[in-house]
Amino acid sequence: MPYSDKVLEHYERPKNVGSLDKSDPNVGTGIVGAPECGDVMKLQLKIGPNNIVEDAKFKTFGCGSAIASSSLATEWVKGKTVDEALEIKNTDIVNELSLPPVKIHCSVLAEDAIKAAIGDWKQKQGAEAPVAQAEPSASQS
């Protein structure tokens, strides 16, 4: 299956790989996985004043499409408000990366990771988590 040029770019030169301090109250961590393929994605967002995403980092174990989806998601969330970041949909990622139908689950992981990271951040702030938040994994505790 041929990958699009955008997938190859994010796979070969991923943006924002790494970790943020998960104990920082301004950092939300989302860890999501897809049992059907074994992809696991960790996305962390540092949220500053006025609920603006100041930084984003990811670590993904998975295929090129999963890595590309993670990398693109970190690029897209930076500079957005929390509410704007929650508006990023997997279909936007699919369209941007030209993902084939068999790889759509990778874009779903990225959307779920954004929601889970923001949910974690909101819990640290004492606020309600987004309704569509992915279930937190045991490793987040």
Image (spheres, rainbow, N blue to C red):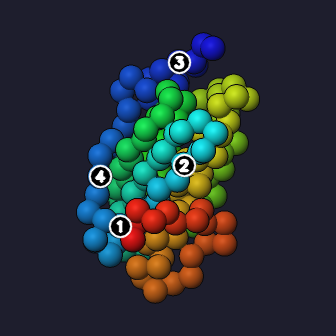
**Relative to 63, is 70 above or below?**
below
Marks 2 and 1, how far apart in space? 20 Å
Amino acid type of the residue that numbered disc 4 sits on in the rendered structure: Ser
Label 1 belongs to which residue?
27
Say which label, 3 or 1, has the lower sequence index. 3
Disc 3 to disc 2, how far (Cα)?
25 Å
Mark before the other along the chain sequence, 1 or 4: 4
Which of 66 and 37 lies nearest the eye of the viewer?
A: 37
Label 3: how many Cα within 10 Å (few below 14, some 14–19, many 20+):
few
Q: Residues within 10 Å of mark 4 (few under 14, many from 20)?
A: some
CB of mark 3 within 8 Å of CB of mark 2? no
Q: In the rendered structure, which disc, 3 or 4, sits on the residue that comes first in sequence?
A: 3
2 or 1: tag closer to the N-terminus: 1
| x and y percentages locating residue 131 in the rendered image | 66, 72
Q: Point out the frontmost of discs 2 and 1.
A: 2
What is the distance, in whole Å, between disc 3 and disc 4 at their CAs? 26 Å
Would residue 45 appear left or right of 137 to someone viewing this image? Answer: left
Please say whether residue 54 is visible from this viewpoint.
yes
Of the two numbered discs 3 and 2 in the rendering, the one whose residue sits closer to the viewer: 2
Q: Residues within 10 Å of mark 2 (few under 14, many from 20)?
A: many
Residue under numbered circle 3: 5
Q: Residue at x 38, y 32 (%)?
A: 14
Side of 90 where 67 appears, left or right: left
- Tell me if mark 1 has few (under 14), some (14-19) or many (20+) residues whose alpha carbon lies within 10 angstroms of its own: many
Q: Position of residue 118 (x, y in %)?
A: 50, 66
Instruction: Report the amino acid beneath label 1.
Output: Val
Left or right of 32, for residue 99 = right
Image vertical order of residue 122 relative to residue 117, above or below:
below
Residue where numbered disc 2 is placed: 33
At label 3, which amino acid type do we have? Asp
Which type of secondary structure does the marked residue at label 3 adopt? helix
In this rendering, the label closer to the viewer, 4 or 2: 2
